[in-house]
Structure formats: structure tokens, C-alpha cells
């Protein structure tokens, strides 16, 4: 009975994960793009991420900048290829060389900058004024860096009132961190300067459209998160952030102010979620460090500033992180993450074999005494205290421990949840192929037949779970047994949209468990 209750608790845990996938993550999936307003230019307007603004910004709809004849400045490093437009001196493209948009071999690099029809305010110098219309002059047309090399692109310009402006982008040859420095000369009345970030480009930034875009910030080691879509309804102001920005499922764009006087405002303008970070100029300049890249644990830890907090492995992070490292090590040997998952599952199953064998033996002994337990329930149906006493005596005479089967299943729950979180957030598994039709272990498996996507791996998982239930010694009343046989169908339904890597783990675990059951039952005859 206790084993059944624990299995039911396990099923409820999976149901909670499924509900989280369907009703929480679904809130962060890409919303339809707002209608594109009329723009009096044939040129596509520059992207809004990242750009700069001051407090308070003018309405974004009033900031559509005129087209510029100046070509963008290109910046190429080992990690990315960027483009900076002289109009407003802003970033209009950031292509990550090591990551593609999709799994197709001819896929172009992933561009993190979200294109849009509106232009957020850049450097707002006075109420109603910004540098969105300022045509800056860059000091170079291109910048190429490798390895430990560093370089910068300096933009100088002047607004209609005569204020002289300077923006400097400082880049490194490798990594995903760069710096933006802003200077304003000729007016001492600029109280603060800010940097505006928009969500990570929604298409291709996550697996099968599940972007999970979150406005995110850290203040005094406390993590603040808010769904990007919620910014369209409510805004949030955070004082003194260490960094703030947007996080998608596998990628991150955040800005880190240089001082402790910053303020982050999570809001929206013209239907676009934004995070604006303002801070007071120091020594005539305002500086921000910007990270735009993958949510890789090693990369985030190397940057510091608690950026690794954006990797949410849940309460069982102490299991998820070692499992992820184990997968990487096995991938180094197998060169296939699907095979690595199979090997890891076999190793976990091997480590728990003694406990599993003890469980099956105990279940078999429990099955033998079921007739006597039924008689006791009938005899003491009106006296629960006496029933429990007689049942404990029955267990003692037959040397059966009703709780011995709980430990292996209790261990399985955190392992499953830990691996689920690892597979859901580890960028290493993004677009990682296995074999045949499974070309992305972070996405649900679908074999396309006659235009329909069939979850073959999930169906096989449900079938093996049914076989496993059928082979297990039957305990409890017939109603409870029928409910247990229904669980494979419920699990199959819940696993339909789980990552195929997780389904592969569960399928292999079921097959190995069936093998164990077969040999234990054979040895007992």
C-alpha cells in the first residue's frame, strides 16, 4: 500500500511538471507581433536592443528615426558578428557564430537582436529629446578581433540643440561581454543616462517556440523575475540592481551598471516589453557592461555578477548539475548526447540495482500474504487500531518490510526532476541530435508521416511502462490495480511535450527495469 501511495505521489509530481509546462511556460511563449505602424521610409528601422534612454523617456511611437545613408559598422569576433548603425549609434544585429537558428544544416547563425517597428528612446537629453535622430559619425567602418584582442568603436554626434554626444562600444575577441560608454558634453543638466533592452529575439531562441522570455534582475543576491508578457500590463521598478535584462530558455541579454545608484524599470512601450536601466553619470561618463549570449553555466560563471542565477535547476539543482556534468563527460566519449543519456541511465540503474532487487523481492512476498491481509481487513473492518496491530504482526512473521520498496522510488523522483531541469535548461542539448528523426533532444519527438507528427518515442515509453506494470506483482484491491494500469496512459499524455531527451531517459529506464523484473522472476522459479 505504501509503495502504491508513493508511486501515486510520483505521478502527481509528474503531473505538476506537466502543468508547469502547459500553464506556466505557455504564458511566456511568443505572442503575436503587434501590427506594424506606417513608417515614412523604405528602410527597415533599426532594432531596439540594446539602446539607451534617460528619465523620463518620450513616447516610443514618436521616435521613428529617419533613414541614414551611412552603412552600419561591422564588428566580428570569435563569438559573434555585430552591426552598429550610425543612426542613433545602436546595435541592430548580433549573430552568435556558435549557435544556429534551427537544426537544418544550412541554417544561418542565431541573431539575438529582436527586430521591431518601433524605436525606443536612446540618449534622452531633455524632455521630449533623444539621440534617435542623431546621425553619428563612427571612427571606423569595421572592427575584427580574435582571442585576447580588444578594440572599440567610437561614435560622435551632435543633437539639434548643440549638445555634443559620444558613444563608445568596447569589444573583446572572444566571449559575449562588451561595454557601452556614454558621454554628454555641453549640458550639466542631464540627471541620468540609461540603457534600454528588449526581449531576446523570439524566433529560434528557444526549442519549438517555447521562449520563456522573462524580465530578470538581481538585487543584493535576490533574483527578481517577471514574464515579459506581463510587462504589457504592469510595470516594476527595481532600485540598485546588479544587472537587469531579459532571459529566454537558452539565451540571455542583460546590462550591468557600473555604480550602485542605478534603477531598473521593467515596463512596456508601444506594445514592446522593455527593461530600462538608468544611472547617474560619473566622471562625465555613464558605463554599462552588456552580456548577450548563451546561458551556459561555464560562460555565466566566468562573467561573474551572479549571472549563473539565471540557470534555474530547481530545488534538486544538486542532482541536476552533477547529471549535466556527467552527460558532458559521456558526450566526450560517445560524441552523441542521446547515447550519453542511455549510458547515464544504465549507470544510474546499475547503482540502484541492489535496492531494486530488494524492492521486487519484497513486492513478491507482499503478494503472497495478500489473502491473509484481505481476511484481516474483513475481520477488523470496524477496528483500525486492531487491524494495524495484526498487520504488523503478519509482516513480522513473514519477515516482510512494507516500507522497503519506498527508497528506490523515492530516489527516482529527485533524479527524474533533476534530469528534467537539466534537459530543459542546458543549452548543450539545444539542437543536439540523437538518431533517425530525433534531431533535437531538447524538443518533443515527432516523426512526420503524411503531414502528421507522431510521438513515436513517447508511445514506446508508454508501452514499456504498461509492460512494467503488468509484470509487477499485483497488490491492493482490484480497483486500485485497475487505477495503476491506467497510469501508463496518463504518463504518455503528460510526456507528449516533454523534451525527447527526457522521454529517452524514461524509456531506457523502463526497458532496464523490465529486464531486471524478468531475471528476478526467473531466478525465483
Image: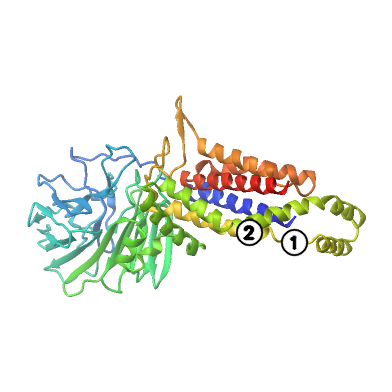
- Asked whether residue 420 appears in the rendered view, the answer is no
Viewer-closest of 281 and 510:
510
Residue at (40, 45) in percent of width and height: 207
Dot 2 falls on a residue whose secondary structure is: helix
Name the residue carrying label 2: 355
Q: Residue 117: x, y in percent?
A: 27, 44
Decide if residue 357 is on the left or right side of residue 458.
Answer: right
Viewer-closest of 28 and 426:
426
Name the residue carrying label 1: 401
Q: Is residue 285 above or below residue 89?
A: below
Label 2 neighbour load within 10 Å: few <14, some 14-19, many 20+: some
Q: Is residue 429 above or below residue 313?
A: above
Which is more N-terminal, label 2 or label 1? 2
Residue at (62, 48) in percent of width and height: 516
Q: Residue 37: x, y in percent?
A: 29, 40
Viewer-closest of 73 and 51:
73
Counting labels gives: 2
Q: Residue 272: x, y in percent?
A: 34, 50
Q: Residue 92: x, y in percent?
A: 21, 49
Q: Is residue 394 above or below residue 111?
A: below
Q: Quadrant of the N terminus?
A: bottom right
Dot 1 falls on a residue whose secondary structure is: loop
- Identify the image quadrant of residue 325: bottom left
Residue at (39, 56) in percent of width and height: 329
Amino acid at each position: 500500500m505504501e509503495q502504491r501511495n508513493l508511486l501515486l505521489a510520483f505521478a502527481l509530481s509528474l503531473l505538476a511538471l506537466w502543468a508547469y509546462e502547459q500553464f506556466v511556460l505557455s504564458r511566456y511563449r511568443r505572442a503575436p507581433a503587434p501590427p506594424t505602424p506606417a513608417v515614412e521610409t523604405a528602410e527597415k528601422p533599426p532594432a531596439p536592443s540594446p539602446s539607451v534612454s534617460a528619465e523620463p523617456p518620450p513616447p516610443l511611437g514618436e521616435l521613428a528615426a529617419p533613414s541614414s545613408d551611412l552603412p552600419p559598422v561591422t564588428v566580428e569576433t570569435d563569438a559573434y558578428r555585430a552591426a552598429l548603425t550610425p543612426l542613433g549609434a545602436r546595435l541592430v544585429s548580433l549573430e552568435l557564430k556558435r549557435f544556429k537558428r534551427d537544426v537544418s544544416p544550412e541554417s544561418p547563425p542565431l541573431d539575438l537582436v529582436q527586430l521591431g517597428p518601433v524605436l525606443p528612446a536612446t540618449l534622452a537629453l531633455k524632455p521630449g529629446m533623444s539621440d534617435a535622430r542623431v546621425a553619428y559619425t563612427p571612427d571606423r567602418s569595421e572592427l575584427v578581433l580574435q582571442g585576447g584582442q580588444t578594440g572599440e568603436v567610437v561614435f560622435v554626434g551632435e543633437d539639434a540643440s548643440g549638445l555634443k554626444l559620444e558613444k563608445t562600444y568596447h569589444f573583446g575577441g572572444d566571449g559575449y561581454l562588451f561595454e557601452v560608454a556614454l558621454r554628454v558634453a555641453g549640458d550639466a543638466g542631464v540627471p541620468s543616462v540609461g540603457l534600454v533592452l528588449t526581449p531576446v529575439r523570439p524566433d529560434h531562441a528557444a526549442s519549438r517556440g517555447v521562449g520563456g522570455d522573462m524580465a530578470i534582475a538581481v538585487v543584493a543576491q535576490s533574483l527578481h523575475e517577471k514574464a515579459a508578457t506581463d510587462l504589457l500590463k504592469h510595470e516594476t521598478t527595481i532600485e540598485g540592481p546588479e544587472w537587469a535584462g531579459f532571459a529566454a530558455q537558452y539565451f540571455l541579454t542583460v546590462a550591468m551598471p557600473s555604480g550602485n545608484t542605478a534603477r531598473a524599470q521593467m515596463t512596456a512601450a508601444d506594445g514592446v516589453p522593455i527593461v530600462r536601466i538608468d544611472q547617474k553619470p560619473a566622471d562625465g561618463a555613464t558605463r554599462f557592461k552588456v552580456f548577450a549570449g548563451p546561458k551556459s553555466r561555464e560562460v555565466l560563471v566566468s562573467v561573474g555578477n551572479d549571472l549563473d542565477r539565471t540557470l534555474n535547476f530547481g530545488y534538486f539543482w544538486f542532482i541536476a548539475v552533477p547529471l549535466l556534468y556527467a552527460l558532458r563527460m559521456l558526450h566526450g566519449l560517445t560524441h552523441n548526447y542521446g547515447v550519453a543519456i542511455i549510458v547515464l541511465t544504465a549507470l544510474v540503474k546499475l547503482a540502484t540495482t541492489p535496492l531494486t532487487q530488494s524492492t521486487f523481492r519484497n513486492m513478491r512476498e507482499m503478494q503472497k500474504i495478500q489473502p491473509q491481509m484481505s481476511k484481516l481487513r474483513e475481520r477488523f473492518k470496524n477496528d483500525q487500531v486492531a487491524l494495524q496491530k495484526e498487520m504488523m504482526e503478519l509482516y513480522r512473521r513473514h519477515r516482510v518490510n512494507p516500507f522497503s520498496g519506498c527508497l528506490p522510488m523515492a530516489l527516482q523522483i529527485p533524479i527524474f526532476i533533476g534530469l528534467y531541469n537539466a534537459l530543459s535548461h542546458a543549452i548543450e542539448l539545444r539542437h543536439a541530435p540523437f538518431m533517425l528523426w530525433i534531431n533535437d533532444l531538447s524538443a518533443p519527438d515527432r516523426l512526420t508521416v503524411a503531414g502528421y507528427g507522431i510521438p513515436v518515442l513517447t508511445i514506446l515509453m508508454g508501452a514499456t511502462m504498461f509492460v512494467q506494470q503488468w509484470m509487477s506483482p499485483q497488490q491492493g484491491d482490484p480497483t486500485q490495480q485497475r487505477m495503476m494500469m491506467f497510469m501508463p496512459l496518463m504518463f504518455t499524455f503528460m510526456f507528449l511535450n516533454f523534451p525527447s531527451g527526457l522521454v529517452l531517459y524514461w524509456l531506457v529506464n523502463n526497458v532496464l527495469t523490465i529486464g531486471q523484473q524478468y531475471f528476478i522472476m526467473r531466478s525465483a522459479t
